[in-house]
């Protein structure tokens, strides 16, 4: 787990060490254990290293293999690298290190861009071919590892964070109108390749891009699971599906223990993280470190779920760390958490993960986390109504969208109104793709391949890596996800959602955690803005920069400030926080 950056010139110029150095400085917190730059004429890569596998300098990056003529900058972890290494050794390759980085180099030389199909893991990388001058970019199947781009006729910039791209200079930082529509409508999800800034894009997940020396490129999508039954599935019973899910989940959790440093668990007290702890205990793990966080109550809402995380920690005898954050500390660190976002992310979970990661990083470098289970196994409240929806697009947008296109027009500033209903059009196109026939499957596909990538997964990466902490997500093991996509929707919707996963959990963990009301990362102080937090928001929205941008209608903003607690989105988010977070993020990037 690290940070990568690079510059590739198409105009006859050389890659600039100053540019790459400035980009790399923005990534320092992602990789506090080492740094490096490699320049080869028109191509230069930078790297910040977090030492997890092969702690020696043999695995330092950017990594060069002069015999193969390849240079690599890599962020992530390839969990099956020992097996791949043995296979490559059988093909005659010799290794000078003991980690996963060199395995990527050899695998690319052996199998070309299709090497990614063999990788179990999370990754974003760039490989430069010395002899051809080509550069391959790649991103893992769920986009767990980010890869931002700025591509012009003169140059291509790549980096693990959007601020790193901005640091290179010369970037078009104007607001992208379609991205703004998504941010305000699609629950702050801005699908790849867009970002909120016109001059910055991101490589879509499950994609490789081969860039030629003249700047032309082609993309290949290397993974797109089918949602629905496959040949032979009709004979599967409910118990068969449970057995298959349990087997794949065990393997996914086990894979993510590969490390040369200890691995802990972020324990929220929900089914997903508790199941990870239970499976690790079942596999014989002892002395496991677990971590939970809680906040002050507000407006009658409880700000922690310690009752359930304590139950699991006690049941399995983990080394549990309960972290409580008072409101004053939340406000103190909120600007830092916003600056740590590669893109504006409205979820209250961000500050929770940011402060949790700060504390966890004092004890450990790697954790497993439960993100992804709801999007893979149908855990959200909008899935059951989708089952019999006559109009799936309308049903999904009614449940998930923060506002309609028509309402948005009255809330945006005059210069930002008009245009198409970009968010609804996006969902309509995605639902029309082949490979997901029933409405629930369509919703699960867009949530797992789009929403998950640009909300929960991005949140975890940004907030953990802000403290040099690697987070691994076993529910996003691609083989487990492929199986989940085949499980009949009816099995997933049982028991109020995640039925098949809850049945698996009943074999492993205490039922009190399973039968509880579904919880979220509670930060009620951001949902019900008041006091110093409201003052901070008021200052941002009243600033000269906010007025000059004119993103929002002043009358709308005044209504929000008049009664913040009454303006809540369908997904129970604060409209004022959504509006203010965008402005706070832009100001945090000095835009």
Image (tube, rainbow, N blue to C red):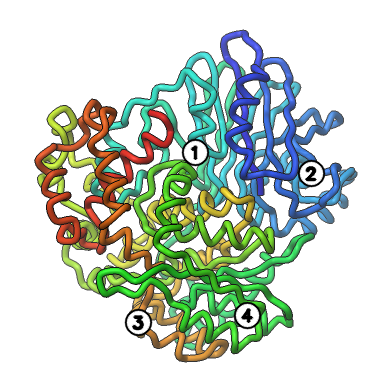
Q: Nearer the viewer, mark 1 or mark 4?
A: 4
- Asked if the residue at tag 4 contacts the one at tag 1, i.e. Cβ–Cβ closer than 8 Å, the answer is no
Mark nearer the N terminus (3 vs 1): 1
At 49% from the left and 38% from the top, the residue drawn is: 203
Q: How far apart are marks 2 and 1 (CA)?
A: 23 Å
Q: Where's residue 284, x and y in %?
A: 73, 82
Q: Is residue 112 left or right of residue 63?
A: left
Mark nearer the N terminus (3 vs 2): 2
Q: Where's residue 445, x and y in %?
A: 38, 59
- Asked if the residue at tag 1 contacts the one at tag 3, i.e. Cβ–Cβ closer than 8 Å, the answer is no
Q: Quadrant of residue 551?
A: top left
- Asked if the residue at tag 2 contacts the one at tag 3, i.e. Cβ–Cβ closer than 8 Å, the answer is no
From the viewer's side, name the closer residue of 259 and 10: 259
Helix, strand or loop at label 1? It is loop
At 18% from the left and 52% from the top, the residue drawn is: 403
**Residue denoted by label 3:** 517
Mark nearer the N terminus (1 vs 4): 1
**Residue denoted by label 1:** 203
- Asked if the residue at tag 1 contacts the one at tag 2, i.e. Cβ–Cβ closer than 8 Å, the answer is no
Q: Is residue 119 left or right of residue 57?
A: left
Q: Which of marks 2 and 4 is in front?
A: 4
Mark nearer the N terminus (3 vs 4): 4
**Residue denoted by label 2:** 102
Work out whether residue 448 can be spotted. Answer: no
Q: Where's residue 542, x and y in %?
A: 23, 36
**Residue denoted by label 4:** 279
The quarter of the rendered structure image containing the C terminus is top left
Label 1 neighbour load within 10 Å: few <14, some 14-19, many 20+: many
Label 2 neighbour load within 10 Å: few <14, some 14-19, many 20+: many
Q: Distance between the residues labelled 1 and 4?
A: 34 Å
Q: How far apart are marks 3 and 4 (CA)?
A: 22 Å
Q: Distance between the residues labelled 3 and 1?
A: 37 Å
């Amino acid at each position: 787990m690290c940070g990568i950056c690079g510059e590739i010139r198409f105009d006859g110029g050389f890659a600039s060490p100053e540019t790459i150095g400035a980009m790399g400085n923005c990534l320092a917190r992602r990789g506090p254990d080492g740094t490096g730059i490699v320049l080869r004429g028109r191509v230069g890569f930078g790297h910040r290293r977090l030492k997890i596998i092969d702690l020696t300098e043999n695995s330092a990056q950017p990594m060069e293999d002069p015999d193969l003529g390849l240079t690599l900058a890599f962020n992530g972890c390839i969990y099956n690298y020992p097996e791949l290494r043995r296979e490559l050794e059988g093909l005659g390759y010799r290794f000078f290190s003991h980690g996963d980085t060199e395995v990527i180099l050899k695998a690319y030389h052996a199998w070309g861009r299709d090497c990614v199909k063999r990788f179990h893991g999370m990754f974003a990388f760039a490989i430069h071919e010395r002899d051809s001058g080509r550069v391959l970019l790649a991103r893992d199947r769920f986009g767990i590892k980010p890869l931002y781009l700025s591509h012009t006729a003169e140059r291509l910039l790549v980096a693990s964070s959007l601020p790193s791209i901005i640091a290179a200079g010369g970037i078009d930082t104007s607001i992208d109108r379609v991205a703004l529509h998504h941010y305000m409508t699609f629950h702050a999800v801005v699908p790849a390749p867009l970002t909120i800034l016109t001059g910055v894009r991101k490589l879509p997940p499950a994609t490789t891009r081969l860039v030629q020396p003249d700047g032309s490129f082609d993309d290949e999508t290397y993974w797109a699971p089918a949602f629905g039954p496959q040949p032979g599935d009709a004979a599967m019973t409910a118990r068969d599906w449970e057995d298959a899910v349990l087997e794949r989940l065990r393997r996914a959790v086990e894979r993510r223990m590969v490390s040369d440093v200890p691995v802990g668990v972020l324990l929220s007290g929900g089914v997903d993280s508790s199941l990870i702890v239970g499976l690790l205990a079942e596999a014989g793990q002892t002395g496991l470190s677990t971590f939970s966080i809680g906040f002050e109550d507000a407006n009658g809402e409880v700000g922690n779920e310690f009752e359930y995380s304590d139950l699991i920690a006690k049941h399995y005898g983990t080394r549990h760390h309960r972290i409580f954050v008072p409101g004053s500390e939340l406000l103190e660190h909120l600007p830092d958490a916003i600056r740590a976002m590669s893109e504006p992310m409205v979820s209250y979970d961000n500050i929770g993960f940011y402060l949790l990661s700060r504390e966890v990083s004092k004890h450990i470098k790697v954790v497993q986390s439960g993100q992804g289970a709801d999007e893979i196994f149908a855990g959200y409240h909008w899935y059951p109504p989708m089952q019999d929806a006559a109009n799936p697009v309308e049903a999904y947008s009614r449940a998930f969208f923060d506002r309609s296109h028509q309402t948005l027009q009255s809330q945006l500033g005059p210069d930002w109104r008009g245009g198409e209903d970009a968010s609804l059009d996006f969902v309509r196109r995605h639902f029309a793709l082949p490979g997901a026939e029933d409405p629930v499957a369509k919703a699960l596909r867009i949530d797992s391949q789009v929403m998950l990538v640009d909300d929960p997964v991005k949140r975890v990466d940004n907030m953990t890596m802000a403290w040099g902490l690697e987070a691994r997500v076993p529910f996003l093991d691609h083989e487990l996800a492929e199986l989940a996509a085949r499980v009949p929707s009816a099995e997933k919707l049982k028991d109020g959602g995640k039925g098949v996963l809850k049945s698996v959990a009943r074999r492993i963990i205490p039922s009190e955690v399973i039968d509880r009301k579904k919880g979220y990362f509670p930060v009620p102080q951001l949902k019900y803005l008041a006091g110093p937090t409201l003052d901070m928001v008021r200052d941002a929205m009243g600033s000269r920069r906010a007025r000059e941008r004119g993103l929002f209608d002043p009358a709308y903003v005044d209504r929000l400030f008049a009664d913040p607690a009454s303006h809540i989105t369908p997904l129970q988010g604060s409209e004022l926080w959504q509006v203010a977070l965008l402005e706070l993020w832009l100001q945090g990037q000095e835009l």
